[in-house]
Image: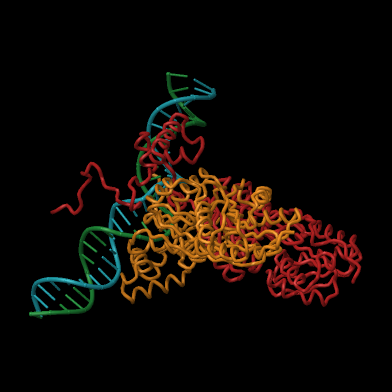
Chain colours: A orange, B red, C cyan, D green
Amino acid sequence: MTEPKMPEVAATRVPAKKHARDGKPNATIYDIAKVAGVNPSTVSRALSKPGRVSAKTQKLIEDAAAELNYQVNPFARALPTGRTNTFGLIVADITNPTFFDIIRGAETTATLRDYTLVLAESAESAVTELTAARRMMATVDGLILASPRMDDDDIRTLARDKPVVVINREVDGVPCVVPDVNKGISEAVRSLAANGHQKVAFVAGPPQSWMSARRWEGVQAACEWSRLEAVRLESTKPTVDGGRQVARDVRASGATAVLTYNDLLAIGLMQELQAAGMVVPDHISIVGFDDIFGADFTTPPLTTVRSPLGECGAGAATLLLDLLHGTGEPAATLRVETELVLRGSSGRLLPAG
Amino acid sequence: MTEPKMPEVAATRVPAKKHARDGKPNATIYDIAKVAGVNPSTVSRALSKPGRVSAKTQKLIEDAAAELNYQVNPFARALPTGRTNTFGLIVADITNPTFFDIIRGAETTATLRDYTLVLAESAESAVTELTAARRMMATVDGLILASPRMDDDDIRTLARDKPVVVINREVDGVPCVVPDVNKGISEAVRSLAANGHQKVAFVAGPPQSWMSARRWEGVQAACEWSRLEAVRLESTKPTVDGGRQVARDVRASGATAVLTYNDLLAIGLMQELQAAGMVVPDHISIVGFDDIFGADFTTPPLTTVRSPLGECGAGAATLLLDLLHGTGEPAATLRVETELVLRGSSGRLLPAG
DNA sequence: AGGCTTTTGTCAACCGGTTGCCATAAATTG
DNA sequence: CAATTTATGGCAACCGGTTGACAAAAGCCT
């Protein structure tokens, strides 16, 4: 009978796997084991279970690992354990500056703790969002949803599978990070009241936006407190363009001060009003929300209620890390403060001319 | 002798793995094999090698897969094959709006082809960048470097291991996506010349920036062509703040028109000049680069040389996909066009007052 | 010293796919 | 109809770690 395969004869075996171009197919724990003269499982323990092996062998193994320039193969580790050291972050729109700081905050925190951030976009669609979330669930240890568009129930379902943290929305039974709008709003409204305004308009965001509802509530409450009249206007979309479109409604409303669901709306609104000859803030005061990148590029620079977005991202990542490593404490909601950033677009109303 | 472990007796085995909270530990090809009455390897083939199994069994297996709601375990697949269906994208600064559109462009293209985008930030540091790149290499099929800060040689070394595409820089032997600055710059300079300007300043970006060098070359060439004088000024950093700081140099230079390495510099510069009482564009024209988000928020809105950043990101992802699936064609450099976006910050010079 | 507990390292099974090789069944051919 | 090619499915090894069970070695006690 002819031996079908050559028994280990060849001195230098050709790896020929992976790395189509280079050589050196990355050291494994088996290589380390050989160098250190121990069993692979001992290497594994030395490298992941602190204190499970004696200091002596630990050192031996670490030296060998360093020498071979070893790095764990994440897939090989993920396969039996399910751990991937990876977070998913889903945002509605990657180019919406509101999310920039959230992304950065989450990324920084994750990287600090040796986690990798994977990003996905939902294109403002609840179904795309759910699809992306489902896809991600397979490969991440936990998921952060920033201003999610999907149902509470869908979120809870996801959360049953792996840790999920929600930003900018409160979902029962799921840990959340939400800016507390009240402080910032009341500062804003008091400032407007102090400057002689009496009627305030709020330009709302998307109907399904949880945060838009909270902001409107906050505005109503603060106006009541300051004895101002509050009216609500609807926007078509929460963008600069949407802000332009709502300008006629704003003028028709007779309000002398406007708060908008977000800065984008405020900027568009301001552009349109200025184009129509109105002077900000002499004729009308404008206040946005979020303090996004570019909010101070306008003339006058935009007064806005700042949410600490970076903090939100970092907080969400921290919450996730706690959930994964923590002592199983219950899902807490993390509240962060908002504050008024007083710039030039709001101020004293000039006597009507 | 006592049997140490119970032989397969229990009818319903407790999986008890993964998914600490839910049940249902995800169907595997083995489950499918059982349902379809075939061998797991056949399932594997049916699902990944088109045409390797008969149409009949194919159908059988697909039905079973659908019924069990099967999805491949990416790690199990990655382990033997090395394929991960994942791209890495490294940017210098996640919150720099220049990268937003690049990120989105890459993300969209990747998602469309069933790839996932993993993001990392280099914090503008060459070593952080290299570290991040190295880390990523282990887990991605290919890497996109946007405006990398590291050496050409480091990039080439990475590129030997896995496909790498570079955006906003040209590296010999590595596929690149670069905006061709000439068209946009010559449009800009011609426009300035037509408006009576004679001396043009260029505010440069970081010394190690490849793109900054190209832009300065382009400005010089275009000025020569239009018989304008060009002077170069240095900035401390390519941000709004850096723009403010360079304002005094700009005034001292005597130039009546300024092009800046990027929009951020232009915006900062404009703010500072306006604060000093200068009127844009009556006293001085300002032209930025990139047409970032917010470039039109300023008053006057910023004239800028637009790079199709989204296209760059998408192009890079496409290049990567070609490299991975393609017929091994050589590394090509993809050039995209720039164009002048004429807004209010540039225009006719008013007779000096 | 003998018996008992605690460390420490080894063995082997396992995670869930992929793939080379082979045997068999089916199709093609002379 | 036999011979040969081709299509199809099965077997088993493998990717590179992790981990429960266990035995050898070491430490502790009386």
Q: Is residue C14 left or right of residue A258?
A: left
Instruction: Compare residues B106 and A212 and report the one nearer the observer.
Output: A212
Q: Quadrant of the N terminus of chain B?
A: bottom left
Question: Does the image show residue A8?
Answer: no
Q: Is residue B118 left or right of residue B56?
A: right
Place residue B235 in its image quadrant: bottom right
Residue at x-position 76% and y-position 65%: B214
Residue B263 vs residue B148, the one in the foreground: B263
Residue D11 x %, y %: 35, 41
Q: Residue at x 76, y 57 (%)?
A: B180
Q: Report the front residue among B152 and C20.
A: B152
Image location (x, y in percent) of residue B173: 68, 60
Q: Quadrant of the C terminus of chain B?
A: bottom right
Q: Position of residue B177 (x, y in %)?
A: 69, 56
**Above or below — where is B112 with respect to B205?**
above
Residue drawn at 38 percent across, 43 percent down: B27
Q: Quadrant of residue B162?
A: bottom right
Q: Position of residue D28 (x, y in %)?
A: 17, 79
